[in-house]
């Protein structure tokens, strides 16, 4: 079912909470079909950073819970499903894997059972040149060190 953009705009006006920044943005555009995509783009650009921080926080909570909890941790399939949903959410706001891999790889790796991590790296080494795998790992850990250093300074 294809809903006309003008109707989508009207629905957006109805569901936007009054008194918030989002409502101000929505109200700043005349409610026409031509403006619907413009208001959506404005909202995305305004809240992209906040969404990114929210997704990363949720991912951090998942990682911490899974690494610190012996009994309450997720099994491998549940962990995969959760991670996959977070990665899809990141991609939905324009964060592609090439942009977040260096930061999130060490976090995700820390909550995966050790035997799975070893199997993963053995597979990489078999498929690719050992030096390429080591260079990738080194780059990731250097970026992680820089990120952690920056966070400590703030």
Image (spheres, rainbow, N blue to C red):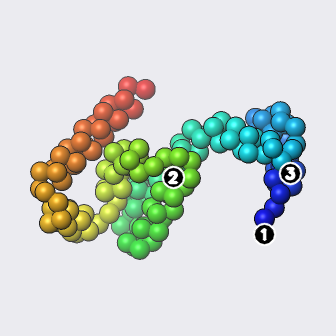
Residue at image coords 51%, 58%? 88
Look at mark 3 in the image and give the residue it sits on: 6
Label 1, label 3: how many angstroms apart (C-alpha)? 15 Å
Q: In this view, does 13 lie to the left or right of 121?
A: right
Question: Of the residues under marks 2 and 3, which one precedes in the sequence?
Answer: 3
Residue at image coords 42%, 68%? 80
Q: Is residue 13 left or right of residue 109?
A: right
Q: Residue furthest left?
A: 130
| Quarter of the image where the N terminus is located | bottom right
Q: Residue furthest top?
A: 153
Question: Of the residues under marks 1 and 3, which one precedes in the sequence?
Answer: 1
Q: Position of residue 84 (x, y in %)?
A: 46, 63
Query: Please, what secondary structure does the residue beneath circle 3 have?
Result: helix
Q: Residues within 10 Å of mark 3 (few under 14, many from 20)?
A: some
Q: Which mark is residue 80?
A: none
| Quarter of the image where the C terminus is located | top left
Q: Where is residue 40 in the image (x, y as percent from the top left)?
A: 72, 44
Look at mark 1 in the image and give the residue it sits on: 1
Residue at image coords 85%, 41%? 18
Task: Mark 1 and mark 3 in contact? Answer it, CB < 8 Å.
Answer: no
**Number of numbered labels in the structure image:** 3
Q: In which quarter of the image is residue 49?
A: top right
Q: How crowded is mark 2: few (under 14 residues within 10 Å), some or many (20 or more)?
A: some
Look at mark 2 in the image and give the residue it sits on: 91
Query: Please, what secondary structure does the residue beneath circle 1 have?
Result: loop
Compared with 103, 108 (above or below) is below
Task: Mark 2 and mark 1 in contact? Answer it, CB < 8 Å.
Answer: no
Q: Position of residue 82 (x, y in %)?
A: 48, 64
In front of the other: 51 or 125: 125
Question: Of the residues under marks 2 and 1, which one precedes in the sequence?
Answer: 1
Q: In this view, does 2 lie to the left or right of 149?
A: right
């Amino acid at each position: 079912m294809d809903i006309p953009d003008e109707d989508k705009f009207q629905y957006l006006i109805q569901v936007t909470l009054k008194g918030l920044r989002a409502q101000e943005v929505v109200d700043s555009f005349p409610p026409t079909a031509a403006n619907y995509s413009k208001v959506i783009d404005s909202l995305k650009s305004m809240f992209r950073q906040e969404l990114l921080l929210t997704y990363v926080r949720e991912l951090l909570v998942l990682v911490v819970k899974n690494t610190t909890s012996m009994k309450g941790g997720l099994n491998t399939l549940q962990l995969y499903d959760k991670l996959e949903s977070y990665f899809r959410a990141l991609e939905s706001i324009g964060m592609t894997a090439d942009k977040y891999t260096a930061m999130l790889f060490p976090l995700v790796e820390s909550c995966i059972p050790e035997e799975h991590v070893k199997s993963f790296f053995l597979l990489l080494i078999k498929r690719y040149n050992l030096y390429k795998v080591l260079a990738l790992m080194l780059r990731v850990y250097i970026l992680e060190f820089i990120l952690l250093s920056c966070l400590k300074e703030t």
